Image: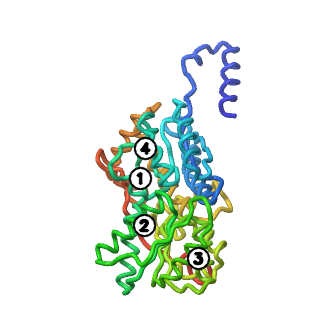
Amino acid sequence: MKHSWIVRSCRGLLAAGAVLVATVPARADIVIGQVAPLSGVLASTGQQMVLGGRLYFDSVNARGGINGQKLKVVVADDGYKVDETVRQTRELTAQQDVVALFGFAGTANIGQLLADKVLEQAGIALVAPYSGGESLRTPFNPWIFHLRAGYADEAEHMVQQLTTLGTRRVAVMYQDDGFGKAGLAGVEAALARRNLKLAVAAPYERNTDKVEQAVRTIRAAEPQAVIMVAVNKPAGAFIRQYREAGGGAQLYSISVVDPAELVKIAGVENAHGLGICQVVPYPYTPNLPVIREYQDALRRFAPGQAPNYTSFEEFLGAKVLVEALRRAGAHPSRAQVVKALEGLTEYDLGGITVHYGPDNRVGSRFVEVTVIGSSGKLLK
């Protein structure tokens, strides 16, 4: 609609003899590409990811955009499938007006982009991916700008909490792919630092919620605690089946789950007491300027949508990207965006500070644990 208005206006002015309009070309949109799992086992998470980014991008556009240019986000659905992530990303980066990528999901998915050198060949930054996989961080690569702490950081925090309480027998239920193995490795390393070994590790197949064998394996090992490195549907299925089978261990989850979705799948009586790692502050209480900004954006641009950790995380990621686009100047190039992101050495998002640099691509290592209460609500 905006572009058709510009065309009609120019025609009218030219017809009136205002030939000077031809010397003032319309500013093009700043185009951002996003590939997210809007279908499949991670669909609810993907929808929240897209929502969080859109909230901030819409806020910026409502204020006039950046340097007079509006933000346009092109979103593609990969269904959480690795080959689709690669295909969709290649299609996006083939469009020269796409200056940055934002908010992808999946350690294995993004890892394949690195293995195939998709980002390197395009010379394009990927900002705020929804993954804490160590393989995306080590060895260092210049193209991915992480907002969140890694799974190793989350594992250390959970194991520290468990062992402080005297827990020694810890099991892991994990997705059998790069994501799950990254979390598993993090737990094993955290236990090893305390001269402990894993009680048992039980995998499940990616893109399914078939966890029956994992339930049997972990029940047989009789652990005191189980750490789940899983996405919503299989995590919810495990919680329900494990509790219904009589499993009494303390349950923990890595951060990439939606508490409301887990309660819906597992039932509140089974999900009650679940500890969930978080890599951004609690978004339900407006005690920081950026949380108030996020909640205001929800009311304005997505009325009826409740605060959510995933959408808040991507809201923060969108703030990082927009600041880099602003610093990159008029008509930013991909290279200018990368350089501007590197320059965010100490950037305050509104009570949350991120740090990047030429040799640093991990903006934050914040981790805390929340708990699902008896009513199904998430508590600090």
Which residue type carries mark 1? His
Q: How far apart are marks 1 and 2 (CA)?
A: 20 Å
35 left or right of 288 in image: right
Q: Distance between the residues labelled 3 and 4?
A: 34 Å
Q: Cβ–Cβ below 8 Å for labels 3 and 1?
A: no
Q: Mark 2 points at which residue?
A: 184
Which residue type carries mark 2? Leu
Which residue type carries mark 3? Ile
Q: How far apart are marks 3 and 2 (CA)?
A: 18 Å
Q: How far apart are marks 3 and 1 (CA)?
A: 29 Å
Q: How far apart are marks 4 and 1 (CA)?
A: 18 Å
126 left or right of 92 in image: left
Q: Report which quarter residue 190 is drawn in.
A: bottom left
Circle 1 residues within 10 Å: few <14, some 14–19, many ≥20:
many
26 left or right of 126 in image: right
Q: Name the residue under label 3.
A: 239
For marks 4 and 2, the one nearer the N-term is 4
